[in-house]
Amino acid sequence: MWRMNAADPDVGLSAPTVTVRGDASARSEPEEAVLWITLSALKNAPGKALADVSSRTAELVELLDQVGVAKADRSTAGVTVTEEFEHTPDKGHHSTGHRASSRIAVRLSDPELIGKLITGATENLAARIDGPQWLISLDNPVRLEAARQAAADASRKAQAFAEGVGARLGRLVRLSEPVAHPEMPMRMARAVPLSAPMPVEQGEHEVSASIEATFMLETG
């Protein structure tokens, strides 16, 4: 965006400026992934539903031990017990029972273990699977590389704008990073029981960076 007014309130200078946004992305293999495993049961009484889920959760804990998931890498993300209702022409609005659910978040770094866990949880425990959501750590060097590329992109854009109006690009007066929006996890559909481990490919994922830069413009 252009600021050509005589007194620029944003930078406190009586000179024209140009403000641009630089964007860039770099690719890297993620260090780990998060998998959400949900167990649920619908019964005619809340206690029965919770007992069913509790029993299968204990089996899930055993499965996590078997595949080598450390206790520090798993946590209960939520437990709910609610009454469910439906509406039918003959019965109207009526209760269909009580549903209990337990949701566990698991952090894994080995794609092969992810596949084994998906298969074991769905085949033996009738679990619902959400994920994996791949994660790249905050201290991964790829994030700094993306930041450098975003700054360079902003400089190139500002230079092009300056040349387009016959001005020279002056000194940098402001550099700020826009507020980042949290990434939404990618979800898998309800898993189908499989006799062999679910193939999971890690691949490379993008890390994006953006920067807003304001430069002085030298005219005349």
Image (spheres, grey):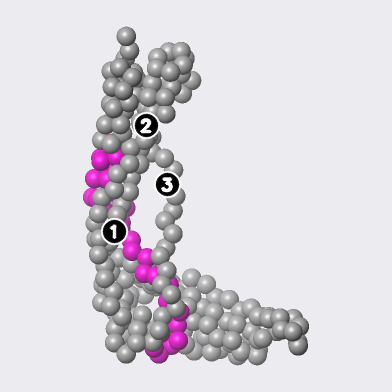
The secondary element bearing badge 1 is classed as strand
Q: Which residue is mark 1?
A: 205
Please report the bounds of the magenta region as a residue range.
122-151
Q: Which corner quadrant of the image does residue 86 belong to?
A: bottom right
In the image, residue 145 lies in the stretch drawn in magenta: yes
Q: Which residue is mark 2?
A: 20
Q: Identify whether 70 is placed above or below 21.
A: below
Apparent side of residue 91 relative to residue 76 in the rendered image (left or right): right
Residue 58 versus residue 162: which sits nearer the camera?
162
- N-terminal-most mark, 3 or 1: 3
- Screen quadrant of the N terminus: top left
Q: Which residue is mark 3?
A: 180
The CA distance from mark 2 to mark 3 is: 17 Å
- Measured as percent of width and height from the top left, residue 151 is found at 29, 36
The secondary element bearing badge 3 is classed as loop
Residue type, mark 2 in image = Val
Q: Is residue 15 visible?
A: yes
Q: Which residue is drawn at the image coordinates 30% and 17% (left, top)? A: 166
The secondary element bearing badge 2 is classed as strand
Residue 93 versus residue 104: which sits nearer the camera?
93
Apparent side of residue 151 relative to residue 92 in the rendered image (left or right): left
Apparent side of residue 61 relative to residue 172 in the rendered image (left or right): right
